[in-house]
Amino acid sequence: MIFNYLQANLLVKDDDFDKIYPKKIARLSKIHWTSVEVAKKAAKFLVTNADSKVMDIGSGVGKFCLVGSATTPGQFFGVEQRQELVSIAQEIACKRGLDRVHFINANMMDVNLKGFSSFYLFNPFYEHIDQAECIDKTIPLSIAKFTEYEQYLFNQLNKMPTGTRIATYHVGNTQIPDSYQLQEEHFFGLLRFYIKSKKCYPLVEKLLNFSTRVLPEALFRMRGIKAHKNIYPNCPPPTHNQGL
Ligand SMILES: C[S@@+](CC[C@H](N)C(=O)[O-])C[C@H]1O[C@@H](n2cnc3c(N)ncnc32)[C@H](O)[C@@H]1O
C-alpha cells in the first residue's frame, strides 16, 4: 500500500514508511536512513530517464533506493557492507515486486562504479569517526579507514564521465571533486546536487589535493606536536588516531 501511495505521488510520512522495517531497524531511521521527502527529491534529480543507473554508496536498509524506484523510472543499486541490512532491503524489494532495485552486500571499494550514471551519498563513512548513535558495534572507530574510504571514493568519482550526477546528504563540499559543479541545494543546504562538467586531470587534482588537504593537515599536526613538546617535554606526542 505504502508504495502505491508513493507511486501516486501522495504524501507518505516517515513513521508510516518505516513500518515496513522490523522495529529495531525503524528506530534507527531518524538518524541513519534518508527521509522519504529527501529521497524523492534526490531521486528526481539523479534519474534523467529510464536508463539512469543510480548507485547508493552505503545503502543501509535500502530506504533511498526503495523510495527512488517507486517514484522515478530509474534503476537503483545499493551497496552495503552489513549483510543483515542488505537481506532486509532485498526481502522488501522482492515482496513488493520492485524489480528496478538491487542490493549488493560488499564494501563499496570492491564494487566497480563504472557504468553508473548517478550516485547518492548519505555520509556513509561517518560512523568511523563518531559512534555516538551507531547502527551497531561491528564497525571500528578509525580515522585511517574514514580517510581511506573518502579518498578512494573521491578518486573514483573524479574518473567518472562528464554528465555524471551526484546527490549528497550531510556531506561536505570538499568531499566532492572540483570537476563537479554544484547545481542546487535543498533542506537548508543539507541536500546538494552536482553534475560533472569538467574533464579531470589527475596530476592537477593530485597537486590541488596536496595543497588544499594534505599539506594543511600535516602543518596542523606538526603545530600540535610542537605545542605538546613544549608542555610535556618528556612525553611522546599522541598519534592522530590514538584512542580511536
Ligand atoms: C547513513 S547510512 C545511509 C543508508 C542509506 N543510504 C539511506 O540513505 O537510507 C550509511 C550506510 O553506509 C554503510 N557503509 C559505510 N561504509 C561502507 C562501505 N565502505 N561499504 C559499504 N557500505 C558502507 C553503513 O553500513 C550504513 O548502512
Image (cartoon, rainbow, N blue to C red):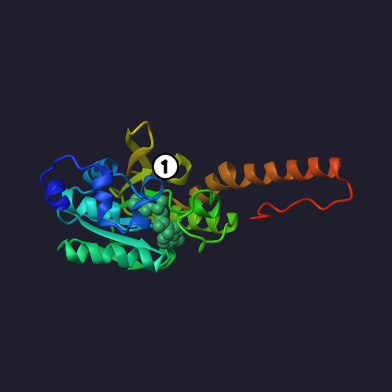
Q: How many marks?
A: 1
Of residues 176 and 199, the one drawn nearer to the viewer in this rendering: 176
Q: Is residue 172 visible?
A: yes
Of residues 16 and 163, the one drawn nearer to the viewer in this rendering: 16
Check disc 1 and report the residue beneath it: 170
Q: Where does the image place residue 94, in percent across and percent down from the top left?
A: 19, 66
For the point 13% across and 47% down, which residue is it?
A: 5
Residue 6 horizontal side relative to residue 123, left or right = left
Q: Is residue 57 visible?
A: no
Residue 132 horizontal side relative to residue 116, left or right = right
Crowd tier of the residue under label 1, counting other residues whose Cα lies within 10 Å: few below 14, some 14–19, many 20 or above? some
- For the view shown, which residue lies furthest in the top direction? 188
As helix, strand or loop, the secondary structure at mark 1 comes to: loop
For the point 57% across and 44% down, which residue is it?
A: 213
Q: Quadrant where the C terminus lies?
A: bottom right
Question: CB at mark 1 closer than 8 A to ligand 1?
Answer: yes
Q: Where does the image place residue 156, in percent across and percent down from the top left?
A: 41, 57
